[in-house]
Image (cartoon, rainbow, N blue to C red):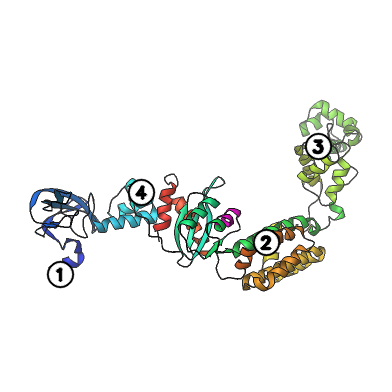
Amino acid sequence: MSVADLLAVLFPQFALLHIEFVGSAGRWVRVHARGRTAGASCPGCGAWSERVHSGYERRIGDTAVCGQELVLHLRVRRFFCHNAECGKRTFAEQIPGLTFRYGRCIVPLRKVREAVALALGGRAGARLAEHLAVGVGRDALIRLLRALPDPATEPVRVLGVDDFALRKGHHYGTVLIDIERRRPVEVLPERSADALAAWLTEHPGVEVICRDRARYYAEGADRGAGTATQVADRYHLWANLGDAVERLVARLRPRWAPPVPEKEKVVPSEAPEGRRVRRTRERHAAVHALMDKGMGHSQVVAELGLDPKTVRRFMRAATAEELIGDRRTGRQSSLDGHAAYLVARFNEGCHSALRLHRELAERGLTVSERTVRRFVHRLRDNAKPATRPPVLKVRDVTRLVLTHPDNRPEGDRVLLKELIGRCRESDEACDLVSRFASMLVNRRGQEELEQWTADAEASRLPELRGFASGLRKDWEAVMAGLTLRWNSGPVEGHVNRIKMLKRQMFGRAKLDLLRKRVLLAT
């Protein structure tokens, strides 16, 4: 291969240029060149012209060469347009595939910068561009993003709809996904039925709409595409069932708590002793132990570091009860008269200060929750939490119920069987959850959904009855979700990608910029 052929392969952008000078200065490589053609076509009418009006030099950025920025000093000619009907009298020549109007870089370099901006955004993209020797600032990258044209919207047959947080808890947008092509087609600035209905009206032809069970998306789909089949996503159906099961487990949890051993119970007739009472007993025992060794008053004071009057008072008292008196808990408390009830409830397994506070309010006692919480803490200190087995957490039991039986370890199977033995309602819950999971995985909604819903409504479990009632309100979409093959999986994937894009653009992005990156980035 000759040198000319090698240069043609490495620098194809210079094929239409006549190179006059190449030099290196610092981190830049400068190339002086001019066009090879005798004339140019008018961009207004397309007429060819070879009559030169004037000329000037353009400095254009080019792709990097051996880690150095390449700057092209291009001598550009301005031609007359001879077409009298054309609005242009003169025009500047453009090198096809290399330059464009008002461009400060060649076309290939602009595409590189656009790709960097789409992938990383402004700040991170500018740092990468510096390493690639295609220097561009973060603001310039953002301007490039905003200048990119929107992709052409092709007809959508299966549409996925979901929301994403613009500001979590305050403002949400909507992303629309072409499920068949797995590509985003639009980003709406709000989460409302009106926005979805307006888009569906402008883009007819949608036959299937995959959505979650939000009311506004169902209403928007009805108004914008009334003939389309709405499909409730199976993931959201399972998530809704999981929430119902978690509420059920939280309600049944006290029944699974193991009984409190007798030795760990607090004496129900007495309130717990305070720190001051315990300290009095300890000091009395220490003083009398030194007295038994034959120490006098001064020696005991020196040994224990107590006030002489305090030591004399302890030496005179035969027992600690003489110093404590009738008030073992210290100063008067608003819980006087209710301590026995609280101790009894504590021994029954109710250790929640919030629940005990509510029960006292129902008994007509006005007391702060903080006072009850302190009392419960003293009860816990007096109890002996030794070998009592821990009470399972709500999330752990919910996971046991929702896990496929074949995937449960042997220990979990034994534990679940033990819990079912303590509470028969959990057996019914496990059966209903297992049947719904089988119907969801195998998409047998057409055959089994009606019977399952009837059984759930007739059960003794109010949480599952509420879940079944919710299915009735969105029956057609739920039936389609448990029967058809469509789901919102691609939509959830793009929502996760939107979260990543938001983190990259934190503090700099508005919705229009986020929309460009969502629609154009691959």
Which of discs 4 and 1 lies nearer the camera? The answer is 4
Q: Is residue 422 magenta?
A: no
Residue 245's image quarter? bottom right
Name the element at disc 1: helix
Where is residue 64 drawn, in percent x and y? 24, 57
Quarter of the picture containing the C terminus is bottom left
Q: Which residue is mark 4?
A: 142
Residue, x 79% and y 66% (percent of image)? 420
Q: CA distance from mark 4 to mark 1?
A: 38 Å
Q: CA distance from mark 3 to mark 2?
A: 62 Å
Residue, x 76% and y 44% (percent of image)? 354
Q: CA distance from mark 3 to mark 4?
A: 70 Å
Mark earlier in primary sequence (4, 1): 1
Name the element at disc 2: helix
Which mark is drawn over residue 279? Answer: 3
Q: Is residue 273 visible?
A: yes
Q: Which residue is mark 2?
A: 471
Where is residue 292 drawn, in percent x and y? 88, 38
Q: Is residue 104 above or below residue 487?
A: above
Mark earlier in primary sequence (3, 4): 4
Name the element at disc 4: helix
Q: CA distance from mark 3 to mark 1?
A: 97 Å
Identified by mark 4, the residue type is: Ile
Which of discs 4 and 2 lies nearer the camera? The answer is 2
Which mark is drawn over residue 5? Answer: 1
Q: From the viewer's perspective, is 31 left or right of 179?
A: left
Mark earlier in primary sequence (3, 2): 3
Magenta span: predominant SS is helix
Identified by mark 1, the residue type is: Asp
